[in-house]
Image (spheres, rainbow, N blue to C red):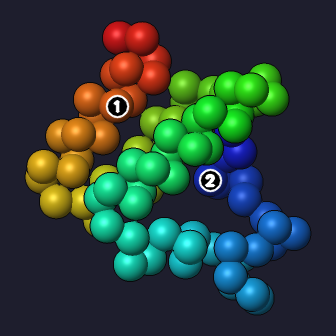
Amino acid sequence: MRSIKNMKSETPLKPNTGSFDKYDGMNGNELMSELMKNVAASKSDGTFSPEQLDEFVSFVSPSLDAQSRERLIELVGMIKGV
């Protein structure tokens, strides 16, 4: 899983931004889907990192409502096997 802190513009999420504008405007379900897609890809290519998962959660949490945040925490627990 790629680190959010080390994200570079060589794979821009939107032209010329190199930021996380990709996630702007996504609702909770879309963010959860994106999370699961990224986790599956990183596990399959051997780059999964629980620390980077926590970093992603910290990044998206402020944009979620309480119910979506609770669901995210539940999903992360399942992903980590907690």
Toward the top, the furthest residue is 82
- The structure residue drawn at horizontal position 13% and vertical position 49%, both measured from the top left corner, is 67
Q: Is residue 34 left or right of residue 69?
A: right
Position of residue 55 measured from the top left corner of the image (x, y, whole percent):
50, 43
Residue with the mark numbered 1: 75
Callout 1: helix, strand or loop?
A: helix
Q: Amino acid at mark 2?
A: Ile
Toward the right, the furthest residue is 10
Residue 60 makes an appearance in the image: no
Residue with the mark numbered 2: 4
Q: Nearer the viewer, mark 1 or mark 2?
A: 1
Callout 2: helix, strand or loop?
A: loop
Position of residue 49 measured from the top left corner of the image (x, y, whole percent):
63, 27
Judge the density around disc 1: few (<14), some (14-19), many (≥20) Cα neighbours within 10 Å. Answer: some
Quadrant of the drawing holding the N terminus: top right
Give the quarter of the image for residue 63. bottom left
- The structure residue drawn at horizontal position 74% and vertical position 26%, both measured from the top left corner, is 44
Q: Number of labelled discs? A: 2
Of labels 1 and 2, earlier in sequence is 2
Separation of disc 1 and disc 2 at Cα?
19 Å
Q: Nearer the viewer, residue 23 or 36?
A: 36
- The structure residue drawn at horizontal position 21% and vertical position 51%, both measured from the top left corner, is 68
Q: Amino acid at mark 1?
A: Leu
Q: Is residue 58 left or right of residue 21?
A: left
- The structure residue drawn at horizontal position 34% and vertical position 22%, both measured from the top left corner, is 77
